[in-house]
Amino acid sequence: MGDQAVRVDVARTAKLEALGWTILRFWNDDVIRDIDNVCQHIVIVAGLVGAEVPELATEEFAS
């Protein structure tokens, strides 16, 4: 990522955070190879630990 892209990203992040958003970033490889931990991190940050989680999609619906 070049210097200009980094500056744009920092500015965009600051603007979104000023509006009350929480920014989470994950490496593509983590999403592909370790989605369970990515999801766990999102749940923790969202404050949903212990919340009721819907049943996982069956193979019929997942494909």
Image (tube, rainbow, N blue to C red):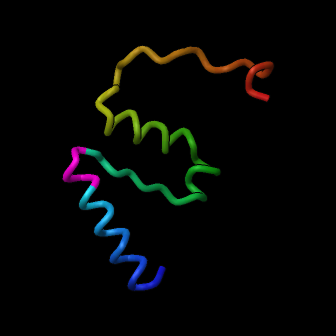
**Magenta portion: prevailing SS class:** helix
- In the image, taking residue 8 as reference, residue 39 lies left or right, namely right
Magenta residues (range): 16-20
Occupied quadrant, residue 12 = bottom left
Which x, y percent locates residue 19? 22, 47
Seen as rendered, the residue at the extreme left is: 18
Nearer to us in this view, 23 or 31: 23
- In the image, taking residue 2 as reference, residue 56 lies left or right, namely right
- In the image, taking residue 22 as reference, residue 43 lies left or right, namely right
* Residue 8 higher or lower than 25, as above or below: below
Residue at x 37% of width, y 18% of height: 51
* Residue 25 higher or lower than 43, as above or below: below
- In the image, taking residue 23 as reference, residue 31 lies left or right, namely right
Residue at x 48% of width, y 38% of height: 39
Which x, y percent locates residue 57? 67, 20
Nearer to us in this view, 6 or 45: 6
Occupied quadrant, residue 55 = top right
Magenta span contains residue 49:
no
Q: Quadrant of the C terminus?
A: top right
Occupied quadrant, residue 10 = bottom left
* Residue 56 higher or lower than 19, as above or below: above
Residue at x 28% of width, y 53% of height: 16
Which x, y percent locates residue 54? 53, 15
Which x, y percent locates residue 29? 60, 58
Q: How many marks?
A: 0
* Residue 8 higher or lower than 29, as above or below: below
